[in-house]
Image (spheres, rainbow, N blue to C red):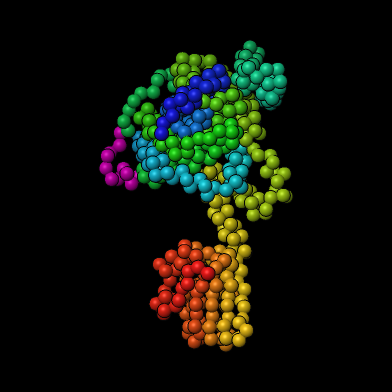
Amino acid sequence: MFDFDQYRQEWFGNIRGDVLSGLVVALALVPEAIAFSIIAGVDPKVGLYASVVIAIVISFFGGRPAMISAATAATAVLMGSLVREHGLQYLLAATILAGLLQIAAGWLNLHRVMRFVSKSVMTGFVNALAILIFMAQLPELIDVPWLTYPMVAAGLAIIYLFPRLTRAVPSPLVCIVVLTALAWFSGMDLHSVGDMGELPRALPQLLIPQVPLNLDTLIIILPYAIGVAAVGLLESLMTAQIIDEATDTSSNKRLECVGQGVANFASAFFGGMAGCAMIGQSGINVRSGGRGRLSTFLAGAYLLVLMVLLGDLLRIIPMPALVAIMIMVSIGTFDWRSIRNLKDHPRSSSFVMLATVAFVVGTHNLAIGVLVGVLLSGVFFAWKIAQIFALRPELSDDGATRVYHVSGQLFFASADQFMAAFDFKEKVTRVIIDLTHAHIWDISSVASIDKAVLKFRKAGVDVQLRGLNRASATIVDNLGTHRRKDAEIVIGH
């Protein structure tokens, strides 16, 4: 049920902090949005308009206060080929469809799949993003005027030392103001925001994508829409989890899915590309004191004002100031304890973390890295559970009955071990398979039981299953075939 008091608190519970942090985020969004537009192969205004609309809309409909959503590289990289082959209008149509798919995912509670993302994968995801954020700054640190380096160093010094004087003003904002003033009055030869691309001077206009409304269009845009929707939700949900931990608060993941969909849907109608949550800008927001929806809203509103009314001022901001801020975010995002824990944590967990980092950084695709991490986690978990499976044989005093005591989890990974433990050539008249301390999970384990029972029967041995719990008995009843031979299944002890 909607809690109006909580919603109002999320908007107005931290006004001063949100007002200042939103401005810092807006300034940091400009070069990012332009760069992501270039990645997607569209005009810079497409990414900038998207960042404005998505940030403003998600502030109302999202489920994670203080998280920043805008145009991102994760979604932009998926749209490049669509733009090259079919043009901007098809990108806008795919963005609309991606938004609808994300809304549907929210209503279907697909956010629950996040339960299958382990801590190791989350750590790898965070570390990979930190590395990618730092790597994204390298073009502004290579083959640039030499004054760039002392300016970046000065920016980092301001960011880390200014809070010792006062926390009344976010140190990243002080960094931008001081370095901009220094660069302007001294006339330093430095790259600036204006060098990234032309900034729009007009408000975004409401439009409808000019594409044929037919099946051919759907066939073209559907694969891109599915990819954008999936990657966008994955990055948004994982970023939301990180912000939850950083602020010691909880968020509504289902509402966040719907909110991301609504934001992308709206972005397309104002000429913007698809986007999702941004861990870098979200980190800037939180570290600058942002905690509520107001910070996200103002990030988009400030960005719009800066572009349209203060574009000339925005253009002179030196890139070293923004590079310093993003390096700070990279350092703060990386989980440095994970390096120290490599020797202490289980090898499988460390391997999953490192594999996630390697695939995300190597492919620049968050979805691939996280998918690899989740699959490896599942494989290692199955292997670990299979190791605690045991089967102990016991012969009756008269030598006529062999009892096999099974304990542990019987599933696809332990099915072969289950079969290998039986002696089908032993001269006994009766075999009891005691499953009191075991649990049967899948069709592979049921098939192994069928095979064991039928092999004993073929050898002329009477077979009885004993001790099945109700869940195990149900799956055996539904999937097993050996009952057709009148095998007796006893539920209980």
Question: Is the residue 410 above or below the residue 187 in the image?
Answer: below
Question: Is the residue 456 above or below the residue 4 in the image?
Answer: below
Left or right? Give the position of 451 relative to 420: left
Viewer-proximal residue among 267 and 393 = 393
Whether residue 97 is visible to the viewer of this picture, yes or no, is yes
Percent position of residue 70, x then y: 48, 31
| Residue 266 position by quadrant | top left
Q: Quadrant of the N terminus?
A: top left
Left or right? Give the position of 209 relative to 264: left
| Residue 54 position by quadrant | top left
Question: Is the residue 241 above or below the residue 170 in the image?
Answer: below
Percent position of residue 36, x then y: 50, 33
Left or right? Give the position of 483 relative to 17: left
Percent position of residue 112, x then y: 47, 45
| Residue 101 position by quadrant | top left
Question: What stretch of residues is rendered in magenta?
Answer: 210-220
Viewer-proximal residue among 399 and 475 = 399
